[in-house]
Image (spheres, rainbow, N blue to C red):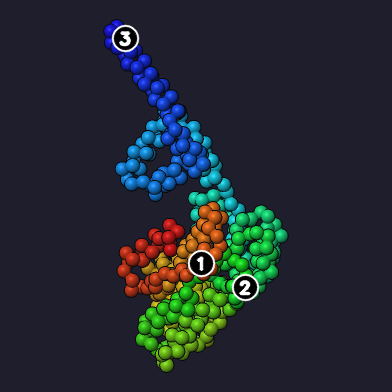
Amino acid sequence: MFEKDEESREKIEQNSVLKNASESFKHNSDFQEINEIVDRKGFDGFADMMAKKVDRRHFLKTMGFATAGFSLLGFPAFAQKKKKEEEKVTDRFRAAYSAIIMAVFWVTKGAETFQHLGGLTGFDFEILDAGADAGVQRSQIDLLASKAQDYDVVFIHPSAIGAFEEPTRELISKGVVVVDIDTLLVPDLSTIDILTFTEPDNIYMGSAVTEFLCKKIGYKGNVVHTQGQLTHTGAQGRAKGFRQTVSKYRDIKVIDETPGEWSVDKTRQVWDDLLVKYRRIDAGFFHNDDMALGAYAALQAVGREKETVLCGVDAMAPALRELKKGHIQGTVFNPACRVHGYAFWAAWYHLVNKVPKGQIPSFIRCDGPVVTVDSKPEEVDSYIWCNEHYLI
């Protein structure tokens, strides 16, 4: 009985203390000033302001005082401000990606990167597959421009330079943010008001892989150069890098440069014909790994897969697994997750963080390493993991 009376007295005293403390905070001029700041800037904004104005000891004392007051009074201003900030985070943005050809490892990974990052940050993506057809892609971008009010940002991976200038300008004129991916929308991007252009160094990629290829065959022999789409500035850069490198070695003969146009099936047909025409092909350089694997299938069909060194570009996880099996001998990262990820974050900073267009680089370089059959297995495995988790 006496214990219960004692507990009752303690509760009454505690309630009395809390009540007096609450009243004290309500009428305290310092706390009233804090409450007004938090109402305008949020608790985080108040903390940032205090951190800049006072030393560490006074900062801790002030924050403790403010926290105690809000705890006793039920967080009135802070709770309202926090609710508004949470509502802001849940704002969703509408995005579209005009993809050059989804049948390619690299493009598929780029689209997956957009969808992954969009899911984390509130961007809903619509993916359009042009199938490497400039006419189809033009129709798709025309459609996007006709319903521009439905989008906040449009990412375009062009299949042909200059083919989509009019609908791109229309999108921009209607307030849509446009980001260029991997190949130039127009010859001079300074003439069109895009947010940014993300691109790897295509000349470097073509040159670096070709250098490894030449070394692998002892700097002599018959070499096939299977190109992508000739209207694609990335393919043009890779071709330039290839030619710069093979021109250094007089005993290397380039016997064919037929474009595979990013297609595994077309490349297989080209190589089926080449294997009939030429008794020996020492190496092949391809503008992407998908085409290199198409050529491997052609070689395998006639039992010649061990006589030809195959090197490509992109280094996506599926191709790296084939490299570990020895089906291709070399590749270089055209880092899809960086090219698309950097493009995404540029748009995110502009739309969500309100960073002005002029403060975002108009060009963002995205590069990655060369990977070959001579690379350490654990290194290749690390690249596969990074690619599968949207890091490279």
Residue 6, placed above or below residue 392: above
Q: Amino acid at mark 1?
A: Pro
Secondary structure under the numbered disc 1 in the rendered image: loop
Residues 191 and 307: in front is 191
Question: What residue appears at the point 47 percent right and 82 percent down from the top-left corner?
Answer: 242
Secondary structure under tag 3 reads helix
Residue 327, located in which quarter of the rendered image?
Answer: bottom left
The numbered mark at residue 5 is 3
Label whose residue precedes the other's in the sequence (2 or 3): 3
Looking at the picture, how far across and down is residue 261, in whole percent? 57, 75
Residue 40 relative to residue 231: left or right: left
* Residue at 40%, 82% in the rendered image: 211
Residue projecting furthest to the top: 1
Residue 161 as seen in the image, left or right of residue 321: right
Q: Evaluate if marks 2 and 3 touch, with contact meaning CB atoms under 8 Å apart.
A: no
Q: Which quarter of the figure has residue 73?
A: top left
Q: How would you rate the neighbour count of disc 2 (Cα within 10 Å): few for under 14, some for 14-19, many for 20 or more? A: few
Query: Which amino acid type corresponds to the residue marked 3 in the rendered image?
Result: Asp
Q: Which label was assigned to residue 191?
A: 2
Q: Amino acid at mark 2?
A: Thr
> Reading the chain from its start, which is encountered first: label 1 or label 3?
3
Gap in angstroms between the C-alphas marked 2 and 1: 15 Å
Q: Mark 1 sits on what residue?
A: 361
Q: Is residue 99 above or below residue 75?
A: below
Q: Nearer the viewer, residue 291 or 172?
A: 172
Q: Residues within 10 Å of mark 3 (few under 14, many from 20)?
A: few
Residue drawn at the location 58% of the way across and 52% of the way down: 93
Secondary structure beneath label 2 = helix
The extreme right residue here reads 146
Which quadrant of the figure contains the C terminus? bottom left
Q: Earlier in the sequence, mark 2 or mark 1?
A: 2
Assess disc 1: are there few (<14), some (14-19) or many (≥20) residues with their C-alpha within 10 Å of its C-alpha. few
